[in-house]
Image (cartoon, rainbow, N blue to C red):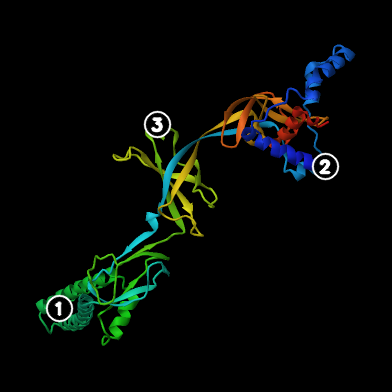
Amino acid sequence: MKRKIAIWISLLCLASLPALGCQRDETNPSSSSAPDHVEKDQGGHAGHDPQAEQDRERVVKMDQHELDEFNVELSTAGPGVIEISIDLPGQVALNADRLAHVVPRVPGVVRKVYKRLGDKVKTGEVMAVLESRELADMKAAYLASVERVSLAKATYEREKKLWEKKVSAEHEFLEAKKSLAETGIEKRSAEQKLHALGFSDPYLKELTKHSDTTYTGYAIVAPFAGTVIQKHITLGEAVKEDSDVFVVADLNTVWVDISVYPKDLMKVREGQNVLITMGGDISPLNGKISYVGPLIGEATRTSLVRVVLPNPDRTLRPGMFITAKITVDRIKAQLLALKTSLQTVDGQTVVFVKTEEGFVPHPVRLGREDALQTEVLDGLKPGQVYVSRGSFTLKAQLLKGAFGDGHGH
């Protein structure tokens, strides 16, 4: 228990050093007696390795229980890959491939409105109902064409039989045939107009069976499942066939539009990994570049790069600003260490390496790096076990000994 308290005190002292301006007390008796101690050791151990002695003086001892207590983690040094990345600004946007401007297709007067702003809709769900005189005219024209085709067909069949029996003249048969063809064209034209408004063949078939029903009602339906993000329709309003009465968006996926500067364009390509960070409590998300724009914007002088992200819980809201970390290269390194392992001791960057006696700070020379790890050029060997997380605790223990409070051995 006393040792744990001592470690906590070391941590607090180390954290307060910059504020308090602490420095080693040169008048401390233990400090002044250190040279005598060294001289005696040197005298008593001729030919002793000074570096080995220094390592023993700087060793930090912590057992497994203490490592767990202070969340100290160990890793084995070895080769790996450094991901070279660039940070770029961006913004969350609606997925325009899953965005629909809902228009009536026919002019009319609004009689019913079922959906409000923010409501969720299903495919084919009725959102509003219009009363349209133009629609009534189209349905009436279709029903009239059906009747004319029926009459023309009967006339054609009769004239054909009479002509075959040489009872009527050939021109009467040909006239009936022409009339049947013309009425058929009129019927198909009337069908196409109603098909363009979303009416199916089964509906038209039923319409001929109930010709006494009201023809003016037109239902505005959702084109796909989504959310109503805009609404421009009210009861009693007269709307035109090209009016945007609703805008429906599928928010299950969103676009992340990233602005790339010309100097970075040659590094960016489709399929590269991207880490999207939004800040706040939202966890970073991973994605891949799906589109690289071929143009430079005149106003922004940047090019557009796009990532499509899933958004099932609606965490990503169009309009949010983001930072995109794009991995532009992957470099193999012979030896890597986590950045969380690095500490500065006596002006040197060190890594605490596990030895038989305890943990010893090894000065290291660093090379290339990414967000999480760095290349070690010297000071660490493959296979050595080092403190990868929680090294600040060991630094505190080391400095505690250096300030005359006793060594960790």
- Residue type, mark 1 in image: Ala
Residue 310 in sight here = yes
Judge depth for marks 3 and 2 and give the one in front: 2
Q: Earlier in the sequence, mark 3 or mark 2?
A: 2
- Left/right placement of residue 216 relative to residue 9 reads left
Residue type indicated by callout 2: Lys
Which is nearer the eye, 145 or 97?
Answer: 97
Q: Secondary structure at mark 1?
A: helix
Q: Secondary structure at mark 2?
A: helix
Question: Which label lies toward us, 3 or 1?
Answer: 3
In the rendered structure, are the residues bearing label 3 and label 1 in contact, judged by CB atoms less than 8 Å apart?
no
Instruction: Compute the Cα span from label 2 to label 1.
Output: 113 Å
Name of the residue lying farthest toward the right: 44
Q: Give me the C-alpha separation between circle 3 and circle 2.
A: 58 Å
Q: Residues within 10 Å of mark 3 (few under 14, many from 20)?
A: few
Q: Please name whichever residue, 169 or 17, is drawn nearer the observer in this view of the structure.
A: 17
Q: Most extreme residue toward the front, as rendered?
A: 27
Check disc 3 and report the residue beneath it. Answer: 263
> Residue 2 shows which numbered tag?
2
Q: Nearer the viewer, residue 281 or 220?
A: 281
The mark found on residue 203 in the picture is none
Quadrant in the rendering for residue 212: bottom left
Residue closest to the eye, 19 or 354: 19
Query: To which residue does mark 1 refer?
Result: 176
